[in-house]
Image (tube, rainbow, N blue to C red):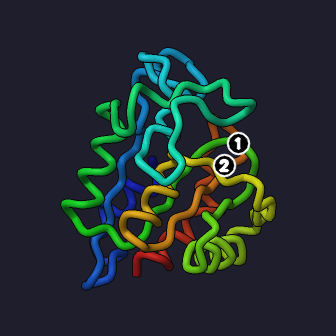
Amino acid sequence: SQIAQEINGNKGLVGASKRVIIIPTVNPDGYKAGLDKVNANNVNLNINFETKGWKQYGGEGNKYFAGSKPFSESESRVIRDVVLKYNVKKMLSFHAKGSLVNSEIHGPSEELARWYVSKTGYSFYEDTSWDYPGTATKWFTEAVGGPAITVELPDYNDPDTARNKKAIFELIK
């Protein structure tokens, strides 16, 4: 992404006590095949994380397969391993579409989400009934305790760089 290239090209954008880890595409085979939400194994990676209440089927009427067990997919294991190896403190997960920010039901996550909304002009997703087990952000809050938010970009093909860049650069300074 353009933001990742800018960060890579200008190390001064990152605060001295901070580290930025960007995983540009978590689901490369699904993305390449044009699949919505699932990888080539037909697993919805975003509900393949070990959380309280994890179940094999979840989301949108329980139609999405979350895998045979938590972390059954290499893609979700990569995220878990990177988070744990590098002692990640905050997680921003970018999805599409909706122009909104969704936080886990977790004080620090809600605080980060509201801050991000104030910087980008996205809407804050207030529906607390959205509380799916198995998501990457829920796993992060349960396993690490740090804030985790999902930024729903306006469109599948638009990273909305101008709106997100200022907030991201401020966050990493």
Establish if 123 lies above or below 2.
below
Q: Nearer the viewer, residue 70 or 22?
A: 70
Label 1 vs label 2: CA separation? 5 Å
Q: Residue at x 68, y 30 (%)?
A: 62
Which residue is identified by label 1? 97
Taking depth in this image into account, of 28 and 139 the one nearest to the observer is 139
Q: Earlier in the sequence, mark 1 or mark 2?
A: 1
Residue 143: % across, % down: 37, 63
Q: Is residue 77 above or below residue 44?
A: below
Q: Residue at x 50, y 15 (%)?
A: 33
Q: Which class describes the residues within 10 Å of circle 2: few (<14), some (14-19), or many (20+)? A: many
The residue type indicated by label 2 comes to Leu
Res. 29 image quadrant: top left
Label 1 residue SS: loop
Mark seen at residue 153: 2
Q: Are marks 1 and 2 in contact (CB under 8 Å)?
A: yes
Residue in front for this viewpoint, 166 or 51: 51
Q: Position of residue 47 (x, y in %)?
A: 52, 39
